[in-house]
Amino acid sequence: MKETVVEISAIVIAYHGMKFLPDCLRTLSDDLSSLSHEIIVVDNGSNDGSVAYVKEHYPDISLVENKTNLGFARAVNIGLEKARGRYLYILNQDLRFPPGTAVSLLERLKADETIGLIGPRYIGFDGKLQKSARSFPSYRHIFYRALFLDRLFPRHRRFADWRMGWFDHETEKFVDQPMGAVMLIPRKVVEEVGLLDEKFPIFFNDVDYCRRLKAAGYRLLYYPGATVEHYAGASVRQKPLKMRIISSLALIRYLKKYARPREYPLVVLCAVILLIGLIPLSIAVLFKKKPT
């Protein structure tokens, strides 16, 4: 990372983002206007005109143009290495920022040095609450999901523990993992813990990073005092089977990374369960009626 010269570095990861970037950058720029800041856009090989849009409308933004899609984790790391802020604001492109968002997150983060990462409350572009706080996934969560227990008992403290279905998301709470679409982290924490693990290029890099932060002794805060608008799942909806396969493989890799040798049979069993779970979606995609 570069020498510190601004209060906050906002790092926006972009990929074919013309649907979202105009609103994202407009609201982000307005929201950061009262703070010493920089905005870094790391583009992962877009060919939809988004790079030209940033150059034309935001010449002061620091733009990194990757020739190909290097994955979310690598793009974030490029942004972190370029950042000059005391606080690092890692952002998806499919966001809109109401006034006061960054100031609210920053003030709460500064008030408690034990916090290694803070994330906001999310609502969709339709105004509906998005349940974003999570527990770290474990073997039992895979079994519960395979048996539909988390769906049959969506508010159960044990069966719905992974996605915290019992939590109202209206209360400030220290959690395992706030959603990775917005992550505000002190620079000193990143310098201590390191960059994102690029073995998780798209999915579970945020989960892995949160786990590393907790292992280093930091707390992670879900903070509903700040609300961000988030258009969730845009890329997943475009290619549901491909994204589900990538997500399942990333979850298997995550479980394996933290497994003790005696737990390897459980990792294999979870892998089998996850791959079997892809069969219904594969059939649905195969037989989906093509538009005429």
Image (cartoon, rainbow, N blue to C red):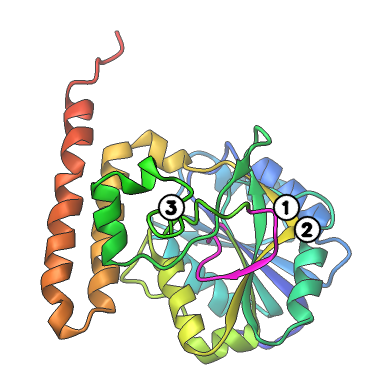
Quarter of the C terminus within the rendering: top left
Tell me where residue 255 appears, x and y as whole percent: 26, 70
Bounds of the magenta span? 169-181
> Which residue occupies the extreme top position in the image?
292
Task: Please rate how many residues cluster around mark 2, counting C-alpha atoms within 10 Å: few if below 14, some from 14 to 19, many from 20.
Answer: some
Q: Earlier in the sequence, mark 3 or mark 2?
A: 3
Q: Which residue is mark 3?
A: 45
Q: Are marks 1 and 2 in contact (CB under 8 Å)?
A: yes
Taking depth in this image into account, of 131 and 72 the one nearest to the observer is 131
Task: Please rate how many residues cluster around mark 1, counting C-alpha atoms within 10 Å: few if below 14, some from 14 to 19, many from 20.
Answer: many
Q: Which mark is residue 227?
A: 1
Q: Is residue 245 left or right of residue 79?
A: left
Disc 3 versus disc 2: distance between alpha carbons? 29 Å
Disc 1 versus disc 2: distance between alpha carbons? 7 Å
Q: Determine the image quadrant of residue 42.
A: bottom right
Point 23% across, 64% down: residue: 252
Q: Is residue 108 magenta?
A: no
Point 32% across, 59% down: residue: 141
Q: Which residue is mark 2?
A: 101
Tell me where residue 38 appears, x and y as whole percent: 73, 68
Q: Is residue 201 left or right of residue 107?
A: left
Q: Amino acid at mark 2?
A: Thr
Where is 87 relative to 289, above or below? below
Q: Is residue 64 left or right of residue 145?
A: right
Q: How many marks?
A: 3
Q: Are marks 3 and 1 in contact (CB under 8 Å)?
A: no
Disc 3, SS = loop
Q: Is residue 71 left or right of residue 262?
A: right
Q: Is residue 149 visible?
A: yes
Disc 1, SS = strand
Q: Amino acid at mark 1?
A: Thr
Disc 3 versus disc 1: distance between alpha carbons? 30 Å
